[in-house]
Image (cartoon, rainbow, N blue to C red):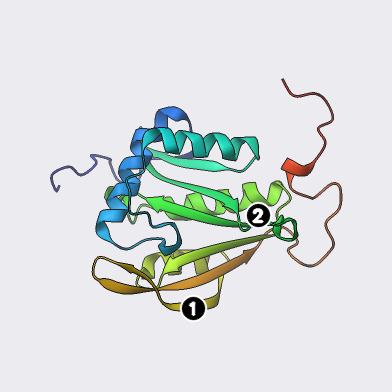
Amino acid sequence: MAAGAASVLPGTEVVIRPSSDADVPAMIAIYERHIRKGVGDTGDFEEERLLPDELRRRRKTMRSKRLPHLVAERGGQIAGYAYAVPFRKRPAYRYALKHSIYVHPDHLHAGIGRRLLPALIEACAAGGYRQMIGYIDASNEASLRLHEACGFARVGYLPAIGYKYGRWSDSVIVQCPLGTGAEDQPNAWNRPERERTPPFPSS
């Protein structure tokens, strides 16, 4: 086993659950590994390091909007995480989300993405959202295959849209309908939970 690799036995159970503040250091470590590798979500690439307080703030904002922020735990270790945020701020796009998913390099080929992404889709559909968008580096074939297996279709291509590590990167836009998608009109019962009036005061 390579130095620093996670000592997790094959077949170890994967548990998908909401993230907590205690997971922040592990999530940052996963994110930074992806950034150093140079292949990931072009749309979320950041020049500056993602600091713990910033990630905690983002999680708090997502919770306030009832948006899912999930982790995959394998053998007691955080093997990946996924989340969704509003696609755009304007009201017309309130039923659409964009998402990000990251898997720790030491847990690749263990089915982490194939557990995380469907769980994220299900949680967003249950919240009343209708479409999920993703931006994927065109060179990340593994992520493209994962998304297609989970119901995403390639709907756009942005050539040379990003520049990092001395090269131009292309981005593939993928989209997946949530719930009934565009088959019917949203109503008071299936609009995003953050817009609903709660039946009782929150504590």
Identify the mark nearer the N-term, 1 or 2.
Answer: 2
Q: Check disc 1 and report the residue beneath it.
A: 157
On the question of residue 18 being in view, the answer is: no
Q: Quadrant of the C terminus?
A: top right
Q: Nearer the viewer, residue 154 or 89?
A: 89
102 relative position to 128: left or right = left
| Amino acid on which disc 1 is placed | Tyr
- For label 2, the SS is loop
Mark 2 is on which residue type? Lys
Q: Which residue is under mark 2?
A: 89
Q: Residue at x 86, y 47 (%)?
A: 188
Q: Which mark is residue 173?
A: none
What residue is drawn where x is 36% and y is 43%?
50
Report whether 22 appears left or right of 57.
Answer: left
Find numbered disc 1 in the image and state the secondary structure of the residue it sits on.
strand
| Crowd around label 1: few <14 · some 14–19 · many ≥20 (10 Å) | some
